[in-house]
Amino acid sequence: QLQASGGGLVQAGGSLRLSCAASGRTLGSYIMGWFRQAPGKEREFIGAINWSGRGSWYADSDEGRFTISRDKGQNTVYLQMNSLKPEDTAVYYCAVTWKNGSSRSGEYTYWGQGTQVTVSS
């Protein structure tokens, strides 16, 4: 089970940190990715981090505003989002894959329930 949290309402230019806690099953050396989906749009890859936490990759569209990290001891992955814009408004999802370098949602097996992020102008 993946539990995403930390979403909310923030003003443009602000920051949020989302969390995704994994529990309830043995996932092995999983990779955790973050995606988002705005109303009427397709699900979009944000970035992902490998099991060790020393490797991560991001969508070009992130513009360096998003950073993913993980706490293996807590089995939790974080998405730090800075300089937020109204167009970042979406439901944010965490998901698990074992495919290194993956950015395709179809390659992610387990998904969290999503957390809403709303950025006001």
Image: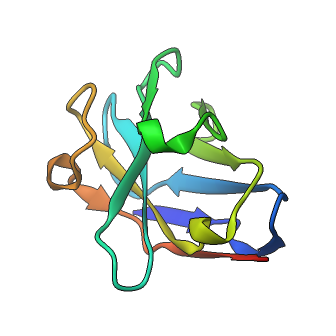
Q: With 56 as the anchor, is 120 left or right in this view?
A: right
**Where does residue 56 sit, x and y in percent of width and height?**
46, 25
Q: Which residue is drawn at 79% across and 77% down?
A: 121
Task: Please tell me which residue is depicted at 83% across the width and 58% down the height of the picture.
Answer: 13
Residues 79 and 14: in front is: 14
Seen in the picture, residue 64 relative to 4 is either above or below; the reply is above
Residue ID at (41%, 66%): 112
Q: Residue at x 33, y 34 (%)?
A: 30
Q: At which x and y percent is residue 68?
A: 58, 36
* Above or below: residue 24 compared with residue 8: above
Q: Position of residue 27 (x, y in %)?
A: 31, 42
Residue 32 rendering spot, x and y as whole percentages: 41, 41
Scheme by which the image is coloured: rainbow
- Farthest residue to the top: give it: 54
| Front in this rendered view, residue 53 or 46 | 46
In which quadrant is the N terminus drawn? bottom left
Q: Quadrant of residue 12?
A: bottom right
Question: Which residue is the extreme one toward the left?
Answer: 106
